[in-house]
Image (cartoon, rainbow, N blue to C red):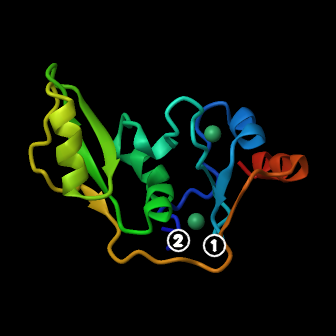
Amino acid sequence: MCKECYVDEKRITPLLNPFDCLENHTQYICGTCGRCICIEHDQNRGLQRWNFPFKSLEIAKLYLRTADYTTKKSCGIYEIKSKNGRLSYKIFEDCEDLRVYLRKNKGKICETMAPVFKVEGYEEYPNTQIRKLTSDEIQKYMSER
Ligand SMILES: [Zn+2]
Ligand SMILES: [Zn+2]
């Protein structure tokens, strides 16, 4: 596992429409393994990808580094259950953040109220870059997938 971005598949992200994401969105470029993680704020609500729910814990892990980097602390991935029993995974800064979310989303619960995954001890790394890729870099990155 990459110590900086917590994932061992160095080119797995972006998952959907990778060219579009790499071309148009600001990326967290892991200074250790080179993986690009979308860190763009959406135009409507200013939210980043990591603010939204994920279908699986594995996918949520792909984005956890951008949450930690943005908040400058160790965020946690929490398992959220909907009324219909469906599970999703959501990243929160801490338990208080989770409580606020649950108060606003009455149909949702978190059974354990504890993170299912978290990387203790937030660290910064010297070679991290936050920017859009050049078209040459996009070609290279995609050829390495
Ligand atoms: Zn993107
Ligand atoms: Zn990495």
Q: Which mark is residue 32?
A: 1
**Circle 1 — which element?**
loop
Ligand 2 under 8 Å from disc 1 Cβ: yes
| Residue drawn at x 88%, y 46% as measured from the top left | 135
| Residue drawn at x 74%, y 38% as measured from the top left | 24
| Residue drawn at x 90%, y 51% as measured from the top left | 136
- Give the camera-side residue of 90 and 104: 104
Labels 2 & 1 near each other (Cβ < 8 A): yes
The three-letter code of the residue at mark 1 reads Thr
Q: Residue furthest right?
A: 136
Q: Position of residue 18 (x, y in %)?
A: 69, 37
Q: Position of residue 74 (x, y in %)?
A: 36, 67
Around disc 2, counting alpha carbons within 10 Å, would you say few (fewer than 14), some (14 to 19), or many (20 or more)? some
Q: Earlier in the sequence, mark 2 or mark 1?
A: 2
- Give the camera-side residue of 123 and 62: 123
Q: Residue furthest top?
A: 84
Q: Is the residue 52 above or below the residue 71 in the image?
A: above
Q: Name the image quarter holding residue 85.
A: top left
The three-letter code of the residue at mark 2 reads Glu
Ligand 2 under 8 Å from disc 2 Cβ: yes
Alpha-carbon span between mark 2 and mark 1: 6 Å
Q: Is the residue 133 above or below the residue 14 in the image?
A: below
**Circle 2 — which element?**
loop
Q: Position of residue 94 (x, y in %)?
A: 25, 58
Horizontal side of 115 relative to 68 (left or right) equals left
Around disc 1, counting alpha carbons within 10 Å, would you say few (fewer than 14), some (14 to 19), or many (20 or more)? some
**Residue marked by disc 2:** 4
